[in-house]
Image (spheres, grey):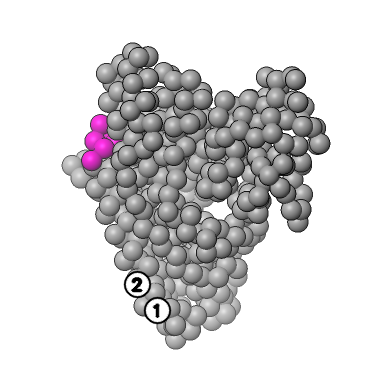
Amino acid sequence: MASLSNITGTCVSPGEIIGTICFYKKNIKYSKKDIVYLNEWLTSGVALLKNAGGLLSNHGGLTCHASIIAREYKIPCLVALKNYKILKEGQLIKLNATAETITIL
Amino acid sequence: MNLENIAGKISAIPINKIKKIHVACRPPEKSNVVLTVKINDHNWYCERPTYYWSTFDKSFVEIPYLDEQKIIYPNIKTPLAIFDKRGLFWTRDEMSSFGLLRYFLNHPQKYISVMTKHTTDVKNIMQDIAKQKNNWNKTKYLKINLAIIQASYYKFYRYHSSVFMLFDELAWQFRRLLLKYLTIEQVNSYFPQFLSGEATRLALKKGYVAERSALEYQPTRGVLYAMNLRPRLFYAAPKFKLHYSNNTKIANALYRAKITTKDLKNFLAFRKLVPVGYQINEEAQYAETAGLSAHLGVLIKLVYKKLNLSLDKIQKLSLEQIIAKL
């Protein structure tokens, strides 16, 4: 297990989840096992991700509308990620949004 | 110094020579750059440096933006807000998000009373527009409806800085204060509950969020109007509460961490301000988009048709000039 301590982000919705990193694509049905990474932090994207297990984005802030939606869906979520490029599609990770940590499993 | 002189002085400074500060409360995509200049010992701020208001836009925002100080600081007669000749909106420190935050932390009840007035106004705006619902897209009623939407924007934007500009700073500074004394886990388990409200829950239930988010892809949208969005009057009244889970636990942790008297006072004020500010901000965002912007979009299309004017030409005219041509 390696904690990705270089990745920092801001928690906009607390919670903890183990899942696989998926890079966001339109028209894909995500499940609670998926932690979806979005390059754009738009309401339209997040509004469709009700069933995702976790959300990550290098953009966004506490009060963005997309963050508000993530919070209402109660999906653990970190935004404004730094050093996010070390995230790889398909990696199994533990996202602890409350502690603002990401651990590769 | 009068309004014209201040506006003249600010307008004379080229944009690239104006000092820029970055604010942490907003992400870069939400405009995190604030322009600042010092005129006669007072700091002036432009918190939306990408918004160059046109003559047409100013017909809707100028009066209410400049009037807001009368609601917040009725005793200050000196102008605290101006538009420069480029169309940028500037506020003196007292009306900036920084000054408003300081003021409302010291006067939380004032904030609640201003926001209560705002929410009553929003309700009335919705009713005024709803009365014309069946006549909104009829050319016969265009002049009347333009007057209604202008009056609605006046009422709505009389609270512009205290609703739209202040909120990001308010939420950010509350979180920052908590982080001074508590662990990240304690903060993230406690703070997000203050950023939650009825408007978004109802909007999600009704599928309204998808409509609102359509704005993100609208190339034709100005700040005040959405051309391709279905006009809809959506209103969810904010519900205010004072009890949040872990209040006592967090208060004890703050005491254990030896919170200063000033921070404790601010903590108590933030607990009142942030949930109200959040809900009012949400209410206003929904009222603004499909409520006001989409309704004005319908009227602009009718103006195109009747006067055969492009949007660019409309932008150069005041609403009064347009009405005179109709």
- Disc 2 is attached to a residue of which chain? B
**Residue range (magenta):** B103-109
- Can the viewer see residue B86 in this picture? no
- Going 76% across and 37% down the picture, which residue do you hit? A20
Count of marks placed on residues: 2
- Going 75% across and 56% down the picture, which residue do you hit? A27
On screen, residue A5 versus residue B114, left or right, reads right
Q: Which residue is mark 1?
A: B132
Quadrant for the N terminus of chain A, please. Answer: top right
Give the amino acid type for the residue marked by disc 2 in the picture.
Asp
On screen, residue A9 versus residue B184, left or right, reads right
- Going 37% across and 42% down the picture, which residue do you hit? B275
Nearest to the observer: residue A54 or residue B210? A54
Give the amino acid type for the residue marked by disc 1 in the picture.
Gln
Residue A93, image x, y percentages: 73, 30
| Residue B108, above or below B200 | above
> Residue farthest to the left?
B75
Residue A84, image x, y percentages: 72, 29
Tell me where residue B278 sits by quadrant: top left
Q: Which residue is mark 2?
A: B128
**Secondary structure character of the magenta stretch overall:** helix
- Can the viewer see residue B179 in this picture? yes
| Residue B236, above or below B90 | below
Residue A43, image x, y percentages: 60, 51
Quadrant for the C terminus of chain A, please. Answer: top right
- Going 35% across and 14% down the picture, which residue do you hit? B256
Whether residues under marks 1 and 2 lie with C-beta atoms below 8 angstroms apart, the answer is: yes
Q: Residues within 10 Å of mark 2 (few under 14, many from 20)?
A: some
